[in-house]
Amino acid sequence: MSEKSESEPPRPYKWRYGPLRLVMPWLCIAVGVFMAGDGALSLAANGGGDPLIFMLGLGLIVVGIVTFFVARWQAKRGF
């Protein structure tokens, strides 16, 4: 393998702030809201159904919010 010289700048990425970083947090939040709503309605209608869908929906919402702030931080830092 060849070693890089110190004068050579690091290779830039093709897309610094790609479309997936913009869309995925919002998509994750939207799917999480849908799943949490569906799970809540299922729990209310069946009188104590399985709360797994509700908890997964809330988890997706949290992951989407964290991913949004991480993407903003990366954009601010130039990643």
Image (cartoon, rainbow, N blue to C red):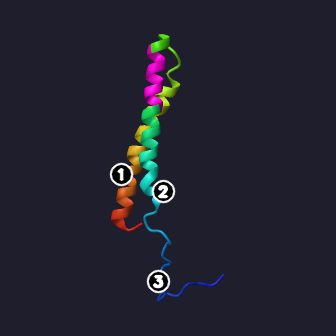
Q: Which residue is mark 3?
A: 9
Magenta run includes residue 38: yes
- Which amino acid, by three-letter code, is at mark 2? Leu
Q: So how many labels did they put on this image? A: 3
Going from N to C along the chain, the mark reached first, 2 or 3, is 3
Q: Position of residue 54 (x, y in %)?
A: 47, 26
Q: CA distance from mark 2 to mark 3?
A: 26 Å
Residue beneath the point at 39% across and 54% down: 70
Quadrant in which the N terminus is drawn: bottom right
Q: Magenta part of the protein: which range?
A: 35-44
Q: Position of residue 31 (x, y in %)?
A: 47, 38
Q: Which label lies toward us, 1 or 2?
A: 2
Secondary structure that dominates the magenta span: helix
Compared with residue 12, is residue 65 higher up or lower down, i.e. above or below? above
Other-residue count near label 3 (Cα within 10 Å), few / some / many at <14 / 14–19 / ≥20: few
Residue beneath the point at 39% across and 46% down: 66
Q: CA distance from mark 1 to mark 2?
A: 14 Å
Using residue 77 as the reference point, say whether residue 9 is left or right of it.
Answer: right
Q: Position of residue 78 (x, y in %)?
A: 38, 68
Q: Which residue is mark 1?
A: 69
Q: Which residue is mark 2?
A: 20
Using residue 61 as the reference point, say whether residue 52 is left or right of it.
Answer: right
Of the pair 74 and 6, the residue shown nearer to us:
74
Residue beneath the point at 49% across and 19% down: 42
